[in-house]
Image (tube, rainbow, N blue to C red):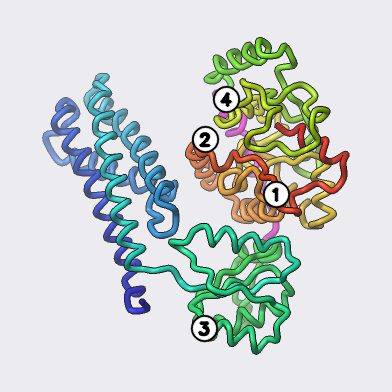
Amino acid sequence: MKYLLKFKKSFIALQKALLIIAMTCVFIASWQTSYQYALFSNMGNYLVVLSYLFLIILFANMYGGFKIGVKRLNDVVYSLCLSTIFTNFVMYIELCLIARMLLSFVPTIVCTIVQCIIVAVGCYCTNTMYYRIFTPHKVVAVLDQNSPRNDIIDKMRRIKERYSIESVISCDLPLNEIMSEIDKYEAVLICDFDKTLQNKILRYSYATKKRIYYLPNSNDIVLSASIHNQITDTPVFICPNHGLTTEQRIIKRFLDILISAIGIIITSPIFIGVCIAIKVCDGGPVFFKQNRITRDGKIFNVLKFRSMIVDADKVDLKKSTANDSRITPVGKFIRPLRIDELPQLINILTGDMSFVGPRPERTENVYEYTKMFPEFNLRHKVKGGLTGYAQIYGKYNTTPQDKLNMDLLYIEKYSLLLDIKLVFMTIKIIFQKESTEGFSEEASKIGEIAHQNDVKEVVKDE
C-alpha cells in the first residue's frame, strides 16, 4: 500500500493526460471533417489545437473535473461534461471567426456527445482502477462527545471509497491511550475540542507520519490566509486583515452593475413568466421581502419570487423540508432551478448586494448565531452576495459554523479571479439537487433556532 502511494500522483496525471488526448482527438476529427472552412493552410492549426487544450484544462480544473479519487464519480463526470460543453461552445465561436461565417452547430453537438460518452466511460474505468489500487486510509477519529460538529464522522463514513473510519475515541481518555490508539491506524481525524489537547495530538500525529484530517475553527481559517515573513532569524505569519482594497471595491461594483443589468435584460421573459404564474397560481403577492444584514451590519430588504403559500409561518412553525407541503406548484419548479433568487439582481443593481459574497442572513438568525459564535459578525466585512463559497460548496442545511468558515475562507482569500471562478462554479451547481436540500427532520441542533419567534422567521425564508 505505502509503496503504491508513491505512484498515486503519476497514476492520476496519466489518467488526466489520456482523457485530454482522447477528447482533443475527437475535437480535431470533428473540426477537420465538418469545418473545412475553418482550417488554416499553415501553422495556424496548431494554435487552434493549443487553444482547445488551454480551454479544456482551464474549465476542467475550475470545475474539479480532474479530482479523480477525491470527488465522487458522478461529480467528476458532470464536471468534465460541463467543461466540455463550455470549451466546445467557445471553440465553435472561434471556428466561426476563422471561417468568417456562421457554421453549422450540429457537428459541435455530435462532437460533444461523443466526448461526454468518452468522459463517462473513461472516468468509470479510472475510478474503478484507482480505488482498487489505492484503498482508503484507515482512520481513527478523536472527538468530544458533546461537540455539535461530530457530524463530520457520518459525512466521511458515507464516502466509503475514500474514508474508512475504523475507530472513534473520546478526547477525555488519557493522552497516552489516545496516542496508543493513533499508532494502530494510518490516519487520524482531529475533531473540535480543547485547543491545547488538539495541538498535542497534532504534534504526535505529525511526528509519527500519520495522515491528518483537522477540523478547523474560525481562527484557523484566518491564519490559513496569512503571509509568511522572515524577521531576521524568526519566521512570522502576517494577517493583512485589510479586506478589499479601494481598487478592488470599485472594480467589483462596476462588474456588479454590468452583470446585474445584463442579467435583468436577458432574464426579463423569465421574470414576466414567473410573475404571471405566481398570480395565476394563488393570486398572492409576486415578491417575498425579508430583512437581511450585509456589510458593516447594514439592514436591507432582500427580494425573492414567492415560492411558498401566503402566510406559510401561520400554517406550520418549522423549517422548510425537501417535501414541504407549503411550497406552491410554482415554487416546486423555481426553487430547484434557483429562479426564485432572480429578483436579487435588482438588489445587486441598487447596491444592497454583490454578485459574489457571503449569503446575507436574516437579522434574527444573525443575532442568534452571534450568541453561539461571537465571530459570526466577521462575515460582514464584505457585502452580502447572491452566490458565494458557502452556496457552492455547502448545502441549504449546512450548519452555521461551517457556513461561517467557508465565508471567512472567501473573505481572507478574496481576489477578482476568485469571484470569476465562483460565478462559473454557480453555473455548475444550478442543476445539482444536493445543494437545494431542505432541512432534514434530524437537523443538527446547532442549526435550530432556539426561540419560537425566530422559528417564525426561518419558515419565511423561501
Q: Which residue is mark 2?
A: 430
* Residue 14 visible: yes
Contact, mark 3 vs mark 2 (Cβ under 8 Å): no
Contact, mark 1 vs mark 2 (Cβ under 8 Å): no
Q: Which residue is mark 4?
A: 333
Q: Which residue is mark 1?
A: 443
What is the crowding at mark 1: few (fewer than 14 residues within 10 Å), some, or many (at least 20)?
some
Give the Cα distance between marks 1 and 2: 23 Å
Where, quadrant-wise, is the C terminus in this rendering? top right
| Snapshot quadrant of residue 105 | top left
Whole-percent x and y of residue 30? 19, 33
Q: Which residue is mark 3?
A: 184
Q: Main secondary structure of the magenta part?
A: helix
Say which amino acid is labelled 3. Answer: Lys
Quick check: 98 left or right of 356? left
Say which amino acid is labelled 1. Answer: Ala
Residue at 32% x, 68% y is 133
Identify the secondary structure beneath mark 4: helix
Give the Cα distance between marks 1 and 4: 24 Å
Q: Earlier in the sequence, mark 1 or mark 2?
A: 2
| The residue positioned farthest toward the left in the image shown | 41
Q: Earlier in the sequence, mark 3 or mark 1?
A: 3
Camera-near label (3 vs 2) is 3
Please state the extent of the stretch shown in magenta in the rendering.
240-263
Residue at 61% x, 73% y is 168
* Residue 423 visible: no
What is the crowding at mark 4: few (fewer than 14 residues within 10 Å), some, or many (at least 20)?
some
Say which amino acid is labelled 4. Answer: Phe
Q: Earlier in the sequence, mark 4 or mark 3?
A: 3
